[in-house]
Image: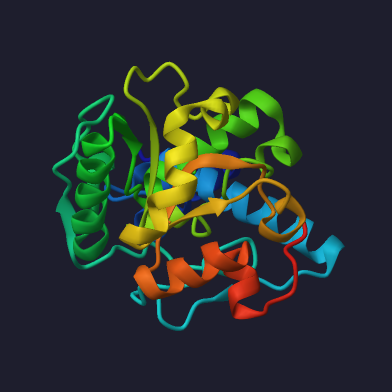
Amino acid sequence: MSRKLPVTSFCLLLTFILTACSDINHPTESNLVNHKPKTIALSERSTINKSQANTSNNIDIQVVAKPDAIAVLVNKQNKLPDFYIPKDLVYTKIPFIVAESERTELRKDAAGAIEKLFLGAKEQGIHLLGVSAYRSHLSQIALFNSYVKRDGYEKARTYSALPGTSEHETGLSIDVTEGEGSCSASDCFGYTKEAKWLQEHAAEYGYIIRYPNGKESITGYKYEPWHLRYVGKAIAKEITDRGITLEEYYGVVPVNR
């Protein structure tokens, strides 16, 4: 003799079946094979912070129209296309503090110029080391968020770029230091003979000191005598001779912090 299934048990069984079917048709993120890595989530969080900051300061960030241009302006108001990768990256033939594969790359013209700059410096008794050249978008995400964790968002913004707005992502910038590496990315580098030599000779090779002293309100970053940016000899000479920044060369409004 058959027994009827109680109404309560039947409802529970029906709910279980519907839930299982829903999971099959609509898998959660944890069930997806190609889900976004945690670094992307950090990028999204940074983008939210950036948007909030820019809204409060009435700053519009625009995507640059020609990211491959040698003299492209990338700063707090002008960003590269999402996950931009330069097409002509090559490994530089200069000594680095740490020989990491990615961070020893530059775009072809910039790489050739930095090699000549290092050679010219060496011939005059100036010994330089590379610290960090090209940096991928994912690397910039990780780096920026590490600074935020250490110093807080607002302070990090004074010396590190939001992902997409870093010159290192262009493949046209490189941080350098003196031969012993004791002042790597530190204020003390500005007092070295190597820094003085760069101030006087970098333009001869198409490079500029991208974030010069006294221009913080324009560039949006503190003085970084170690941060070199390749723009080509003609533009580098004009910027250096006039004592201006890349922003002033293009005649754009000052960058707000």
Which of the 4 image quadrants contains residue 128? top left
Residue lying at 35% horizontally and 69% vertically, measured from the top left:
233
Position of residue 146 relative to residue 60, above or below, is above
Q: What x and y, as percent, mark residue 225?
A: 53, 40
Residue lying at 77% horizontally and 59% vertically, measured from the top left:
256
Q: What x and y, as percent, mark residue 19?
A: 47, 50
Pick the front one: 17 or 231: 231
Position of residue 177 relative to residue 201, above or below, is above
Q: In this view, does 55 lie to the left or right of 176?
A: right
Residue lying at 29% horizontally and 50% vertically, measured from the top left:
34
Residue 21 visible somewhere in the drawing: no
Q: In this view, does 132 lie to the left or right of 154?
A: left
Q: What x and y, as percent, mark residue 122?
A: 23, 35
Residue lying at 29% horizontally and 63% vertically, measured from the top left:
85
Q: What x and y, as percent, mark residue 224?
A: 57, 41
How many numbered discs, if any?
Answer: 0
Pick the front one: 7 or 236: 236
Residue sitting farthest toward the right: 56
Quadrant of the snapshot with the N terminus = top left
Q: In this view, does 141 lie to the left or right of 161?
A: left
- Colour scheme used in the picture? rainbow
Q: In this view, does 115 lie to the left or right of 137?
A: left
Residue 43 visible somewhere in the drawing: yes
Pick the front one: 24 or 182: 182
Residue sitting farthest toward the bottom: 65
Pick the front one: 40 or 90: 90
